[in-house]
Image: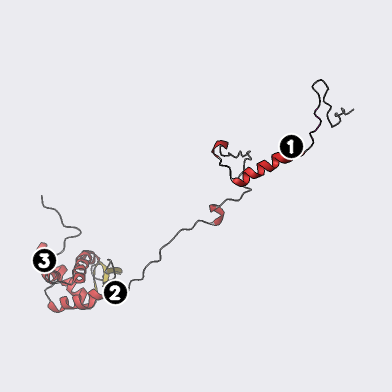
């Protein structure tokens, strides 16, 4: 089953349609802007943009591919030497269609198709930064639980004694021997606390 063409069918047949779009593309590259019906402008846009892409390549094969569609060598030369350098930085979208109303005789919708030759302005990259209030919440907003922190110490067996530590221990032992011993209470004597017992409140 034959596949239908994209969009409205122009002209009497496929060959006539190719000739018609080739002539419209030639006039567009020559005058930079043409007025035609909206249907023809929409069908011309992909053809013209493909030809501009070939012109940006600039090699001999691309020139021969453009010559299949456009028969006028002066227009092809103008496309490769004048239009292609102007759109070298543009990644696509070489044409613009502007609707201009309706034709007076048959009320057909008209449009202007033109080449976009303005220099490309690079877009600034948007970087989203979180506000300081949302990034770090205030301490009063979030309740903090108080816990007793227990510090873990290294095992005693793994410590190595230094000569200074050994001397400090020996001097402490000597002072302990020379000091008078405190009177220790006998086992049978009751131990009296230094503090007075608390009296109950009346």
Is the Cβ of the residue at disc 1 closer than 8 Å to that at disc 2?
A: no
Q: 71 and 80: which one is in front?
A: 80
User: Is 195 on the left or on the right of 156, as rendered?
Assistant: right
Dot in front, 1 or 2: 1
Label 3 neighbourhood size at 10 Å, few (<14), some (14-19), many (20+)? few
Q: Which residue appears at 40% of the width and 66% of the height? A: 124
Residue segment shown in magenta: 180-184
Residue position marked by numbered label 2 in the rendering: 117
Vertical order, 146 against 30 (above or below): above
Q: What x and y, as percent, mark residue 139?
A: 62, 49
For residue 177, which numbered disc appears in the image? 1
* Membership of 181 in magenta stretch: yes
Residue position marked by numbered label 3 in the rendering: 16
Of the numbered discs 1 and 2, the one sitting upstream in the chain is: 2
Q: 65 and 157: which one is in front?
A: 157
Label 2 neighbourhood size at 10 Å, few (<14), some (14-19), many (20+)? some
Disc 1, SS? helix
What is the residue that sits farthest to the right in this orientation? 202
Q: What x and y, as percent, mark residue 26?
A: 17, 74
Q: Which residue appears at 15% of the width and 71% of the height? A: 59
Disc 2, SS? loop
Vertical order, 112 against 5 (above or below): below
Q: CA distance from mark 1 to mark 3?
A: 124 Å
């Amino acid at each position: 089953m034959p596949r239908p063409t994209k969009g409205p069918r122009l002209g009497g047949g496929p060959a006539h349609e190719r000739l018609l779009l080739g002539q419209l593309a030639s006039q567009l590259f020559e005058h930079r802007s043409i007025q035609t019906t909206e249907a023809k402008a929409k069908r011309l846009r992909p053809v013209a943009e493909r030809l501009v892409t070939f012109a940006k390549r600039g090699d001999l094969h691309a020139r021969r591919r453009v010559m299949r569609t456009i028969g006028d060598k002066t227009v092809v030369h103008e496309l490769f030497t004048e239009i292609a350098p102007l759109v070298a930085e543009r990644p696509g979208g070489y044409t613009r269609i502007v609707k201009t109303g309706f034709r007076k005789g048959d009320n057909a919708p008209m449009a202007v198709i033109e080449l976009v030759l303005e220099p490309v302005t690079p877009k600034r990259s948007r970087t989203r930064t979180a506000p300081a209030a949302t990034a770090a919440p205030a301490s009063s907003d979030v309740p903090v639980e108080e816990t007793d922190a227990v510090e873990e110490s290294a095992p005693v067996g793994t410590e190595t004694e230094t000569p200074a530590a050994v001397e400090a221990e020996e001097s402490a032992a000597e002072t302990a021997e020379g000091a008078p011993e405190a009177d220790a209470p006998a086992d049978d004597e009751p131990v009296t606390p230094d503090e007075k017992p608390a009296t109950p409140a009346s």
